[in-house]
Image (spheres, rainbow, N blue to C red):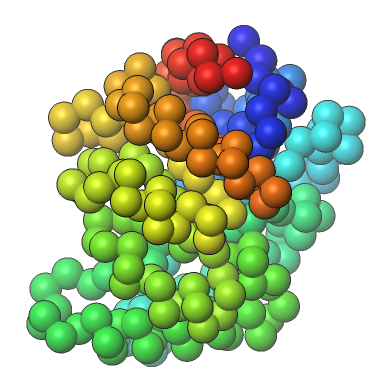
Amino acid sequence: MSLKGKFPFSIGATSYTLADKVVPNVEFLSSLVDDIEIVLFESDKTCPLPLEGDVEKIAEVKRSSGLSFTIHLPLDLQLGHQDKGIRKQSIEQCKRIFQRMEPLQPFGYVFHCNRELGLQPDFNVHWLDRTSESLGALIDFGVEPEKICLETLDYSYTLLTPLIERYHVRYCLDIGHVIRYGFNPSQAIADILTCSRIVHIHGVKGKRDHADLRHFDAGVMKLLIEKLVDHQINERVVTLEVFSTDDLQGSLTVMEKYL
């Protein structure tokens, strides 16, 4: 089932839909969706950057199909770590990714602003200052602030608000995470959708997220779609963040109901 060009916003899927490398995924998805999230899950050794030749092949698909691309930065980045050396490694890794992916002219880059476990309750101020410094370094490197999208994770999205306001970066509103970690999805949509360049949606089954959208609350979906249409003046990618062909097809079937 294809939803390419059907909504007033871009529908996306992930580069891990097929159990295959990134180029076959891009080719498979190019007729089904408007955007592909290239997922760089962890460190270079675990999930290496696509080779330059592969990026060239992806760029060819982009030109022929009209696709856009979002890039999910590695999950193990530590932009706010106490150790300056670890922060520097994360910044340099981001720079390598920006340079490699630039031929795709990505719509946005998704960041996990990870917290360190086991820190004292007053860690937030110091963590925020360190994360802010790292983001500043990336913007100074030349990344457009609006393309930097800070994903909602297992803590209140309000912790990220000072960074959004200071640098004019955007949220990546992951509604699946909002639900999974017990926050109010309606409130999150009201608070930060207009500041979100990218939205992630996926089902939640108990404590497991990234299930297909048949496991997503229909009332929340209706509200989200209504608000996305109301604010269609802003370009936005809505990624169906699932990782198999079955889950993607199930999710596309759900989304079709809202056309």
Q: Nearer the viewer, residue 7 or 181?
A: 7
Q: Is residue 30 visible?
A: no
In screen coordinates, is 185 left or right of 145? left
Residue at left offset 57%, top offset 32%: 13
Q: Nearer the viewer, residue 107 or 6?
A: 6
Residue at left offset 83%, top offset 29%: 65
Q: Nearer the viewer, residue 46 or 119?
A: 119
Q: Is residue 114 above or below residue 222?
A: below
Residue at left offset 72%, top offset 66%: 99
Residue 98 falls in image quadrant: bottom right
On the image, the x and y values in percent for residue 29 come to 66, 24
Q: Is residue 98 visible?
A: yes
On the image, the x and y values in percent for residue 63 come to 88, 37
Q: Is residue 36 above or below residue 99?
A: above
In screen coordinates, is 151 left or right of 16? left
Residue at left offset 58%, top offset 54%: 197
On the image, the x and y values in percent for residue 86 come to 39, 80
On the image, the x and y values in percent for residue 115 come to 27, 70
- Residue ranking furthest to the front: 230
Quarter of the figure that contains the C terminus: top right
Quarter of the figure that contains the N terminus: top right
Q: Give the number of marks.
A: 0
Q: Is residue 63 above or below residue 123?
A: above
